[in-house]
Amino acid sequence: MKNIVVLGSTGSIGTQTLEIVRYHKDIRVLALAAGSNIDLLEAQAREFLPDLVCVWDQEKARELAGRLKDVPVKVCAGMDGLLEAASMEQADMVVTAVVGMIGIRPTIAAIEAGKDIALANKETLVTAGHLIMPLAKEKGVKIYPVDSEHSAIFQSLKGEDSARISRILLTASGGPFRGWTREQMKDVKPEDALKHPNWFMGRKITIDSATMVNKGLEVMEARWLFDVDFDRIEVVVQPQSVIHSMVEFLDGGIIAQLGTPDMKLPIQYALYEKERKSLPGDRLDFKTLGKITFEAPDFVNFPGLALAYQAGRTGGSAPTVFNAANEWAVSRFLDRKIGFLAITDLIGEAVERHYVIENPTVEQILDCEAETYEFLNGKVF
Ligand code: NDP
Ligand code: MG
């Protein structure tokens, strides 16, 4: 039986991962980790009986330990807890479904310990891909993408030689404001931005989809996962979210993966290491769908995408600053402290003033994150 650890088990990806575990009943959950939602974590611990449960918030961890006294489970807290969960001896695979750069250290710890990774936490690869990919190679660890676009590319590459890739065509829905001008977006509120047309996801990634920053992060994620340069990664807007991404090969042939917008397929494909297993859910009906349409991305009204290509091409610590500024700005936008357009404006400002460090270490990445927060905290809004 395969043993997995789920970091971020109470979130959108985490709960869907556990749905798959519940459905197939042939995977054992060794550890679960979350930020602060101990009500759901308690229910998950009682259902899956892991050896270890980790809560970021110390106080909440203590409370959960009290609640779980009757269950043979160890409760730990903070980064130490995440690192312990990520490197548990019996674990075969770690599902990285926490949101944000907090995932860097646990992901590295898991790879160091030889665990395969089902990677949802794109912020980690965006900021530390130059460390993670060579480390995974050195340790013989496989990284299975969970992000739907990257899973689609991964599926399209099955049986193919990645040296024969001509272009990666990364599809994007365009989000709730597709076709809008910046002027039309200036008074957008969190509740408007949280209405994604096709996908139901966590709050942060839903805002990232509305600004198109998510697609920018995915371009950088693709660069590391598939070892292609930025000139060969093209974003194509496909508003129905039916084509999850495509690969064009040297002979001009294009292979795509299609399906309904349901994250359970990419999660399952990663969990079972490319095995096609049954999965209940809606199926595509081309007759009712009628058409699949395409558009070019709007780099002018959605500057986040252009900034991402720029940060990615600059490399070094630039993607960290891009990502950290975005994490900071999205959280302030959700708290109604800044406007929608300020998110990408602030990313631009933070990246612009940053003096790039080439090949940053984990410590330097975390320092750049802290410096970016410090810069943004010092601004008056
Ligand atoms: P959610 O916000 O729904 O869930 C985030 C999870 O991370 C929660 O379990 C949360 O716990 C946990 N968490 C947050 N902070 C910490 C912390 N400091 N320590 C431990 N756990 C923490 O996010 P999503 O599931 O939407 O996204 C997770 C990742 O997957 C992101 O990187 C996202 O970009 C990526 N992704 C998501 C997709 C989706 O469909 N949702 C699609 C593709 C990629 P708590 O509940 O207690 O706050
Ligand atoms: Mg995606």
Image (tube, rainbow, N blue to C red):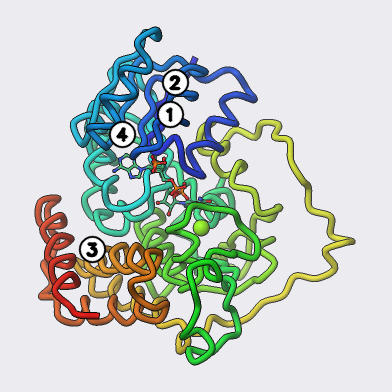
Q: Mark 3 points at which residue?
A: 320
State yes or no: discs 1 and 2 in contact (Cβ < 8 Å). Answer: yes
Q: Mark 2 points at which residue?
A: 45
Q: How far apart are marks 1 and 4 (CA)?
A: 32 Å
Q: Is residue 311 left or right of residue 290?
A: left
Mark 2 or 4, nearer chain start: 2
Q: Name the residue under label 1.
A: 41
Q: Name the residue under label 4.
A: 140
Instruction: Kindly identify the residue that appears in the image at 57 percent across and 78 percent down.
Output: 177
Q: How far apart are marks 1 and 3 (CA)?
A: 30 Å
Residue sitting at the far bottom: 183
Tell me the amino acid under the disc marked 4: Gly
Instruction: Kindly identify the residue that appears in the image at 13 percent across and 67 percent down.
Output: 374
Mark 1 CB within 8 Å of ligand 1: yes
Tell me the amino acid under the disc marked 1: Leu
Mark 3 or 4, nearer chain start: 4
Mark 3 or 2, nearer chain start: 2
Q: Nearer the viewer, mark 3 or mark 2?
A: 2
